[in-house]
Amino acid sequence: MSNRYFIKLSYNGTNYHGWQSQPGVTTLQDVLKNALDILLKEEVSLTGAGRTDTGVHAKVFYAHFNSGHQPDFFSENDILFKLNCILPHDIAVDSILLVKEKAHARYDAISRTYQYIIERRKNPFTQDLAYHYSGKLDLENIRLATSKLFNHSDYTSFSKSNTQVNNNLCQIMDAKWYEQGSRWIFEITANRFLRGMVRAITGTLIETGKGKLTPEDFEKIIESKDRQKAGYAVPGYGLYLTDISYPGHIFIKTVSNL
């Protein structure tokens, strides 16, 4: 009898072509699956909470897999220590959780939260970890434009094309900008995100901060449903997946935890 488990992890995405397995490149899914196969001595099928693009980081990420091993195996055999020893330095597993038989890391997610970090001063310690932009930005204008997001649910203007999704509707629950030292951080929470959505929104909002767009222009871009009218997509290395929420009833117990 197999059981379903959620695995909670974090990673620095610099060296990876995103989460999703692809031929000819190194992905997070492939690296984690290989480590689990070695450790569990069985071939697992690993499903992630979603795709993250090349270079994008995750402070919180979940994936699910089935295993013939019982929960006691994970709690009594230093599994996390061994798994983290196999994994490279830029991936860390935090816990393994026993979940209900049909629990799904992607489809059961209620919301996801991303942060985009803009570093306003030269900082040698945040290369590939934040978007360095030292030009002037009108934060009030950016915040006014950000508020327009809540008036809509179709975000086609900020989606990559040919993504093979049924629709481009999302429920944005929260979106805000705040300062943290020399950084500006854009944080956004929604029930789902389109491919490239956060990066395209951020880039277009930066255009409003530069004075190239007004908040009203930003809203017209949303209404146009035309990616060509939106601004540039900021680099992936400034983007972090910071939280994923699930309904509590899908979890049975934590079987291994750091």
Image: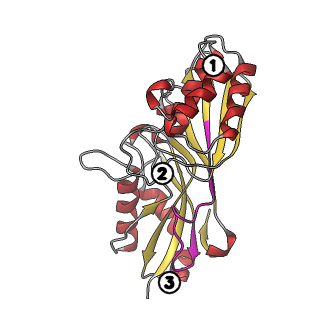
Label 1 crowd (10 A; few <14 / some 14-19 / many >=20):
many
- Amino acid type, callout 2: Asn
- Amino acid type, callout 3: Gln
Q: Looking at the image, can residue 226 be seen?
A: yes
At numbered mark 3, what does the secondary structure look like: helix, strand or loop?
loop
Location of residue 142 in the rendering, given as x and y in whole percent from the top left corner = 69, 23
Give yes or no for contact between labels 1 and 3 (Cβ–Cβ under 8 Å). no
At numbered mark 2, what does the secondary structure look like: helix, strand or loop?
loop
Residue to which mark 2 is pinned: 167
Give yes or no for contact between labels 2 and 1 (Cβ–Cβ under 8 Å). no
Label 3 crowd (10 A; few <14 / some 14-19 / many >=20):
some
The vertical placement of 245 against 189, above or below, is: below
- Amino acid type, callout 1: Thr
Closer to us: 193 or 245: 193
Q: Which label was assigned to residue 208?
A: 1
Q: Which residues are magenta?
A: 96-115
Closer to us: 81 or 147: 147
Closer to us: 175 or 80: 175
Q: Residue sitting at 33 percent across and 72 percent down?
A: 43
At numbered mark 1, what does the secondary structure look like: helix, strand or loop?
helix
Q: Tell me how far mark 2 sits from mark 1, CA to CA.
A: 27 Å
Quarter of the rendering occupied by the C terminus: bottom right
Residue to which mark 3 is pinned: 70
The colour mode here is secondary structure
